[in-house]
Amino acid sequence: MAVPVYILRLLVLLLLLPLISISSASTAVNCTKSYNIAGEKRLFSHCVVLGTQEASLAWSLRPAPNGSLDVIFSGVAPSPGGWVGWGINPYRLGMVGTQTFIGFQASNGSTLLTFDVTKGTEDGKAFVCTPISLHVLNMTINIANGNQIAMFVSISWPIPNVDPSSPVINHVWNRGPSVYNFQPSSHGFSGADLSSKIAINMSSGILFYGPPNNLLENAHAILNTVGWGILLPSGVIAARYMKPFVDPAWFYTHITIQILGYILGVAGWATGLSLDNVGARGGNPSKHRNIGFTLFGICTLQMMAIFLRPNKDHKLRKGWNLYHYSLAASILILGIVNIFEGFEIMSPPQKWRDTYIAVLGALGGVAIILEIVTWIYVCRKRRYSQGKIQGATVGGAYQFEKGPVG
């Protein structure tokens, strides 16, 4: 089968797609400064000035067994009586999911409490002290001049959802002007307030900053959703419902849509590999990643069908059709499932999940309508063909019977 030139050009473009990471990285320095913790001078292996809100971080990591991560976070509240918070997000580089420690000056003395930042917190629900998923070994706080806050936290290592062999941890911090009844007020919404997050390899000290990671995360989500989750199903619909009406135009429409979907999907898959390097983790990142690799492999096999498709009268055509349809069904199922796995990891606003569900519903509705139209068309065409055959038979018999008489 001859392959159209434009398809070959698209495949060449696909092979030239660069698989690169665009994250911004630097390295923390070895600490020479000592910190006073509960009257004891302590040194830490790494420290870094975080760049926003006058915050800094120092830490030492002791590997398992009996491992621990010792951290001292220093920040400045906007005013005396305000609060400073720092936490670890085991899932993603963002606020929701952060296991947080918040320090402030209460009427009964310096206070350090734990908070689990949930989606409800982001939506404005009351922010109250709750247990967190981290195993805290020790924590203490020191406040100077009413707003200069330093908190020391020691937690058991390894921590949940973090691979000890690649100990990249998402750090999130912020501050607010006041605390009422042990409930911190909302933080500010300036650029510095909203960018107070960083992923750090706690072993090597390599830092990965937030905005590039968010760019990669959004690109990964959009490319995969459009490629695997919209274009590939659209290509299947085009193949099934255009074939009875426009042959061979349906074939070129089908493969064009599928190749575009494959290009976007592979670009999104490559972006996901970069995200893994900067500590983007979610509800079940291993499952999401494994499905992604499987999907990439199956889609690549399916693309080879362009070159391996037998002619219609070939004896292997039926077997090839079964193979092709089976892979297509697997791709559709895995693609849609993995998009929802990605939603669980990213925890985007509900409107994005609802939008994709609406798109799937629209595609399903179009497929149902086209299925009905196609069946009506095929049935009418079949009846018309049978009528012509019967008419030809009756006419032929009539001529045969009248022939000898004439």
Image (tube, grey):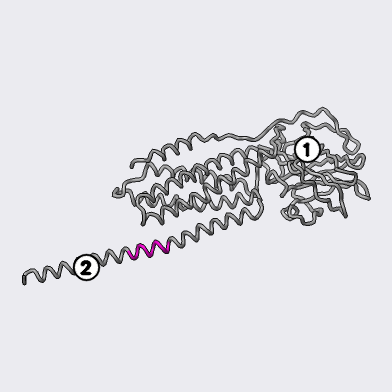
Residue 289 placement (x, y as % from top left) = 58, 44
Q: Residues within 10 Å of mark 1 (few under 14, many from 20)?
A: some
Q: Earlier in the sequence, mark 2 or mark 1?
A: 1
Q: Is residue 223 visible?
A: yes
- List the residue tagged with mark 2: 391
Q: Which of the 4 image quadrants contains residue 167?
A: top right
What residue type is disc 1 on?
Thr
Q: Nearer the viewer, residue 321 or 378?
A: 378
- Is residue 375 magenta-colored? yes
* Image quadrant assignment for residue 391: bottom left
Dot 1: element: loop
Quadrant in which the C terminus appears: bottom left
Quadrant placement of the N terminus: top left
Residue that label 1 marks: 52
The percent position of residue 357, horizontal first and vertical second, equals 57, 57
Q: Is residue 62 above or below residue 115?
A: above
Q: What residue sits 12% from the left and 68% below the top?
A: 399
In terms of depth relative to the viewer, which is nearer, 144 or 211?
A: 211
Q: What residue is at 75 percent from the left and 36 percent from the top?
A: 62
Q: Which residues are magenta?
A: 371-380
Return the x and y of residue 108 as percentages of the image width and height: 93, 50
Q: Is residue 373 above or below residue 218?
A: below
